[in-house]
Amino acid sequence: MQIVLCESADHVGARAADIIEARVRQGPAVLGLATGGSPRSTYQELIRRHREEQLSFSQVTGFTLDEYAGLPPEHGQSYYSTIRREFVDQVDLPLERLFTPQGDASDLVAEADRYEAAIAAGGGVDIQILGIGANGHIGFNEPTSSLASRTRVKTLAGATRADNARFFPDGDVPRLCLTQGLGTIRDAKLAVLVAMDENKAAAVQAMVEGPVSAHCPASVLQLHRRAVVILDPGAASRL
Ligand code: GLP
């Protein structure tokens, strides 16, 4: 695990964008796309480079990390809508090559298996972009998730539902989700995790310095063949 300490959240986004740009400029690439506040500065920097520095995503395929169950793709808070709004629709990544688990599938178990197979059929993920939850989750792999898990249906932890309640003003926060598993994430050729702010410091410490444990799902990155963790001073403050 390589730890990169940055002086600000903007620098975190720029460093992550450097890694992604280098791979995208090489030719066809598969990106694993996380949602949430953490990767926002990375996407903003990639959008800027697309507009100002001819960085093209026309040969990129995107697989989102997770999705709320029960939400149709067009719901404003689905991760499909979110990643389109915050990244895909602002660059030239072809929409037909953006893939998300279908949150409103009638058979969620079958949908999880289909999504896992689609990632494999796409040749696997070249760079998986990740944030980290305050409880150490990655994707929606909540504490006690199996370190070998594949894409599956999960119940959201109460703490995660409370964290994300701000996006659901009607109070109707989904209870279930589909998420790539920790085993799926481990298969990515490179994992880039970005974290900012002091409220992530305890989770970052457990991920980097704690034991590899299902109680801190992000600690599975200690077993990853190539993981880069990019932190601002707040997120790094307990290391
Ligand atoms: C969300 C997402 C994760 C994200 C995490 C942290 O619930 N499923 O992919 O990394 O929680 O979110 P944020 O970056 O907004 O703090």
Image (spheres, rainbow, N blue to C red):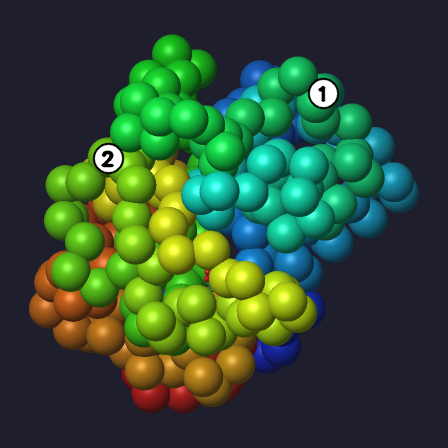
Q: Which residue is at 75% across, 45% downward?
A: 85
Q: Which residue is mark 1?
A: 94
Q: Quadrant of residue 201?
A: bottom left
Label 2 – label 1 distance at C-alpha: 26 Å
Q: Which residue is at 70% across, 48% downward?
A: 76
Q: Amino acid at mark 2?
A: Arg
Which numbered dot is residue 141? none
Report the front residue among 95 and 104: 104
Q: Quadrant of residue 157?
A: bottom left
Q: Residue furthest right?
A: 52
Tell me residue 51's x, y (percent). Answer: 87, 40
Determine the secondary structure under disc 1: loop
Residue 185 higher or lower than 174, as above or below? above
Mark 2 vs mark 1: give the one in front: 2
Q: Which residue is mark 2?
A: 150
Q: Is residue 177 left or right of residue 59?
A: left
